[in-house]
Image: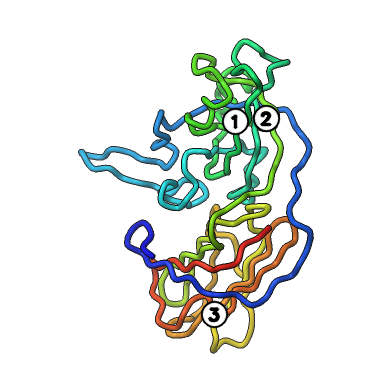
Amino acid sequence: MKLAGGSVALILLVSSFVAVDGFAASGWTSGSATFYGGSDASGTMGIVIFYGRLLLTDGACGYGNLYSTGYGTNTAALSTALFGDGASCGQCYRITCDSEADPQWCLPGGPSVTVTATNFCPPTYDLPSDDGGWCNPPRQHFDMAQPAWEKIGIYRAGIIPVLFQRVPCVKQGGVRFTINGHDYFELVLVTNVGGSGSVQSLSIKGRSSTGWIVMSRNWGANWQANAYLDGQSISFRVTTTDGQTLVFNDIVPSNWAFGQTFTSSLQFS
């Protein structure tokens, strides 16, 4: 199958799984929420117009075009207190407007919406935390895509108090790996992660290499390794933040190329 940018997604089997209980929802916590990105959420992907050309940037998690990668418009940028320097990328949150705190600006009936963390809301230290510096530490704040925000709040409010909880991420299909970089440098983007949604650790192994190489987080959901793996099949070992581990043996065939995306048939719960 084709993915954004012309990359090819190959669907392969995986063979190893460390079983733990599936990810469970957390309790409810108080926070706040604003919105950004426009009515079609295009701005959540860093879309800018430059001399008449439409340009896409990847956001702080690196997911790129959120439409084609399956994240859609139910997304949010997290404040510093929630983002964890990228460790929270991919996590899912159920959010509802706190009508007891501010009934004027909540939609009636107390609806909720589930969003995925795909971006970072930077602090604005020259503004007070209660007057414009909504993402300043230690605030737990969601800058939601506008279509998601409007499912719980009234547009004119601008900012609303919310209650939120982490919930399992439900994904269609398996975990995906996109390999960028160059010889002796692999930059791997892990997407479409179910369960806890966020990756705690990632290791890589070439069929001709001597063992697993522990990767380090480069930025967001991108992980790096310095190894020469050209011309050999590649395996990944992924552990999510709730302790589930999957081993994707030979998920990448030996004729792989940089820029390709490979999709497994296995998913976290």
**Going 46% across and 77% down the picture, which residue do you hit?**
184
Whether residue 180 appears in this view of the structure is no
Q: Quadrant of the N terminus?
A: bottom left
Numbered mark located on residue 139 in the image: 2
Q: Are marks 1 and 2 in contact (CB under 8 Å)?
A: yes
**Going 53% across and 45% down the picture, which residue do you hit?**
118
- Rounded to the nearest angstrom, the CA distance separating label 1 from label 2 is 6 Å
On screen, 79 above or below 247? above
Query: The residue tagged with tag 1: helix, strand or loop?
Result: loop
Query: The residue tagged with tag 2: helix, strand or loop?
Result: loop
Q: What amino acid is found at the position of numbered circle 1 in the picture?
A: Cys
On screen, 187 above or below 58? below
Q: Position of residue 268 (x, y in %)?
A: 65, 60
**Going 69% across and 33% down the picture, which residue do you hit?**
164
Give the quadrant of residue 14: bottom right
Residue depth check, mark 3 versus mark 1: number of the one nearer the observer: 3
On screen, 24 above or below 143? below
Q: How is the image coloured?
A: rainbow
For marks 3 and 2 on the same chain, the one whose residue lies earlier in the sequence: 2
Q: Position of residue 223 (x, y in %)?
A: 55, 63
Circle 2 Cα neighbour tier, 10 Å, few/some/many (<14 / 14–19 / ≥20): some
On screen, 165 above or below 101? below
Q: What amino acid is found at the position of numbered circle 2 in the picture?
A: Arg
Q: What amino acid is found at the position of numbered circle 3 in the picture?
A: Asp
The residue that label 1 is drawn on is: 135
